[in-house]
Image: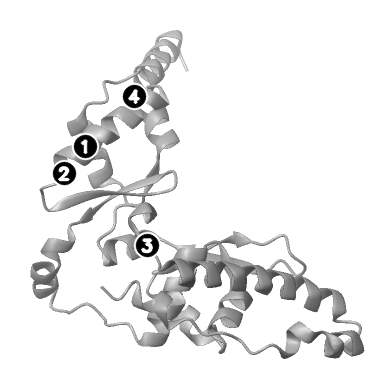
Amino acid sequence: MTDAEVAQSAEATAAAEAPLELTEAALEALLFVAERPLSRREIANLAGVPRETVDARLGDLEVSLRERGIRLITAGERIALATSPEAGALIARYVGVDAVRLSPASLETLAIVAYRQPVTRAAVERIRGVDTDYTLRSLLHRRLVTELGRSDAPGRPILYGTGFEFLERFGLTTLDELPPLDVDVATRLAEEGRDSEAADAAEAGDAADPAAAAADPAAAAEPVTDPEAGAALGR
């Protein structure tokens, strides 16, 4: 490579890395063409601007889109554009399918995951009182539930949570917009979750000692099903 070509390449690299003006319109266009949700850090790095600038433009864009057919949705650090729930019926007619209805079991499982995430399958099953393997797999297939990682508990079980499809399906922009649970239901859900985590640890520790597991009074406790949690999402 000649000196001139080296200089030209360096100039092109510098131009590509130069800070850009992150306008509201540019941010909307970036999110529109992105094939996946983008993080605030990615946007800041792409534009070469501070994180504060990204947050400010996101706030402006959220306000601008509030009365339009596109919404800005966030899940933690990730940002994406989605159609508004008001346009759902028309879009469903265009693509030729109606929204797939969720069964009561799926709604109940999804509610537990949404309100207690990150949560393991064992914890969901103890709260519901029934096997949840098929239901969770169905929700994963529909991308309403996603795998968030693995727990530090013995055996490192998978942790489940909700994704962008969940927010879009229920017309939410963030998880903070989930309808509040009844105080008694929320308290019971939290208590059952703590009991489930403790039971997971106990089972892992007692796996080599069946007699100890049989003597555990928690193992004989009747599970409590919480249909009210599922009703919270059946809006």
Are the two marked residues, 1 and 2, in contact with CB atoms closer than 8 angstroms?
Answer: yes
Element assignment for label 2: helix
Residue at 63% of width from left, 77% of height from top? 122
Tell me the residue that label 4 is attached to. Answer: 53
Tell me the residue that label 1 is attached to. Answer: 61
Separation of marks 3 and 1 at Cα, in angstroms: 27 Å
Tell me the number on the disc at residue 180: 3
State the quadrant of the C terminus.
bottom left
Task: Give the quadrant of residue 182.
Answer: bottom left
Image height of 84 relative to 204, above or below = above
Tell me the residue that label 2 is attached to. Answer: 65
The residue most toward the front is 184
Separation of marks 1 and 4 at Cα, in angstroms: 12 Å
Q: Amino acid at mark 3?
A: Pro
Residue at 30% of width from left, 21% of height from top? 20
Residue 234 at x, y = what percent? 30, 76
Tell me the number on the disc at residue 14: none
Element assignment for label 3: loop
| In-image side of 39 versus 202 (left or right) | left
Local packing at callout 3 (Cα closer than 10 Å; few below 14, some 14-19, many 20+) is: few
Q: Is residue 22 visible?
A: yes
Are the two marked residues, 3 and 2, in contact with CB atoms closer than 8 angstroms?
Answer: no
First in residue order: circle 2 vs circle 4: 4
Q: Amino acid at mark 2?
A: Leu
